[in-house]
Amino acid sequence: MSNERERTYHHGDLRRAILSAALDAIAAEGPAALSLRDLARRAGVSHAAPAHHFKDRTGLLTAVAAEGYALFADALAGAPDLRERGVAYVRFAATHPAHFQVMFQPDLYRADDPDLLSAQARATDALRAGVADLPPGGRGEDDRLAGVAAWSLAHGFATLLLSGNLSDALEGRDPEAAFRSLTGLIFTPENRGDG
Amino acid sequence: MSNERERTYHHGDLRRAILSAALDAIAAEGPAALSLRDLARRAGVSHAAPAHHFKDRTGLLTAVAAEGYALFADALAGAPDLRERGVAYVRFAATHPAHFQVMFQPDLYRADDPDLLSAQARATDALRAGVADLPPGGRGEDDRLAGVAAWSLAHGFATLLLSGNLSDALEGRDPEAAFRSLTGLIFTPENRGDG
DNA sequence: CCGGGCATCTAGTCATTGACAAGTTCTCTC
DNA sequence: GAGAGAACTTGTCAATGACTAGATGCCCGG
């Protein structure tokens, strides 16, 4: 029960410790720089300890992606309308950069992992629910394209933000607020979907 | 002068051979899976040969990014108006997935490389030129936001496309065409910038 | 209370890789 | 035709991911 740092044989919650350290490392230097042995050192355990919880380097990244999609689904579910869902999308990326980065690089993890799949499904549902209250529509498959458009806008903004490509244009402005007013430019009154 | 595969001591054009092999590998398995030694094997040279041309693994990826930005600038420059520039953006991503992937992951390469910087500047100019012919504007800094919006839309679409997230929504439709009609949904006549 | 079973972690090893150093072979120029 | 330098090779080292076998401590049944 050593919740303290009393260095017993059993760590207590090594899985979470490794995951958190991984998130820090990814946020700081990208997923490529991630080293299992380094994470083990930071957690004060042997070099093979992480393997027990995650099997693999890929397994660790799969866990990151799964957790990411779960948190993502929660974040999206809390938003009232399409616009705020977009804002939540951007906010999630800004708040959980490591998760976000891994989630959208499928070559980093095992896409067939059960935990990942269910979390991913929840997130997809939340996303689709947001698109559902788009303009009246009736234009057939254009509705789907409109969903893709909204998704692309939020995703592009989030991605560019994380890669540092928006720092010039935003000049220190709050990204979230910037995105909110940005949507105001695009979704003019006539084709706006929210209240 | 052995332009043939006559296996002389000097390869002939090893730099390009390594670069091309790298692009293949990245497109197939992502930048993380890239191995200098593997590229050397494919090119039929010793394991240290790539280092002479690229110094580093990071150096190789820097070269990829630099070439990418150069090609990107060319691709963007050819487009007549904002919408077509967006289409060119998407087309570039689809045509040069490896370049595109590396370009927008700055933690993979050396951002202060001279060649990279000049190519990047050219691309940025081409991008800004596209935004210049946006709606009449007069709304002050909203113009900048509108540029960010257009960029986000194209970038998000391209990124989601490459990560395979649009395959469901597009159902085999041509991504380029899909993006084109998508822009038609957003840029309604009144705030459309092109002819 | 205690003994076995199991999850958790350690220690040791191997193949692979990136990076570097030093040497070899070719080419080009003066 | 020699030497200077570019292009490539060989050899080596530390670090890493992955695997195996073994040590440790917690928990549950008797």
Image (cartoon, coloured by chain):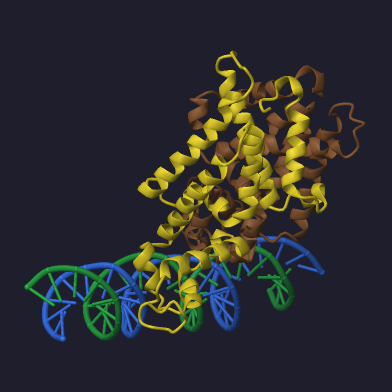
Chain colours: A yellow, B brown, C blue, D green
Q: Residue at x 48, y 25 (%)?
A: B171
Judge by depth and name the residue closer to the eye, A120 or B66. A120
The picture quadrant where one finds residue B70 is top right
Judge by depth and name the residue closer to the eye, A65 or B60. A65
Residue D27 position within the rendered picture, expressed as x and y whole percent measured from the top left = 25, 71
Q: Residue at x 75, y 29 (%)?
A: A186
Quarter that holds the C terminus of chain B: top right
Left/right placement of residue B140 relative to residue A64 reads: right
Residue A61 position within the rendered picture, expressed as x and y whole percent measured from the top left = 46, 57
Residue B122, placed above or below residue B37: above
Q: Residue at x 56, y 14 (%)?
A: A140
Judge by depth and name the residue closer to the eye, C22 or B187. B187
The picture quadrant where one finds residue A99 is bottom right
Asked whether residue B115 appears in the rendered view, the answer is yes
Asked whether residue B74 appears in the rendered view, the answer is no
Residue A9, placed above or below residue B38: below
Q: Residue at x 65, y 45 (%)?
A: A90
Judge by depth and name the residue closer to the eye, A76 or A111. A76
How many dots with numbers? 0
Left/right placement of residue A66 relative to residue B21 reads: left
Residue B105 position within the rendered picture, expressed as x and y whole percent measured from the top left = 63, 53
Residue A130 position within the rendered picture, expressed as x and y whole percent measured from the top left = 57, 32
Left/right placement of residue A77 relative to residue B121 reads: left
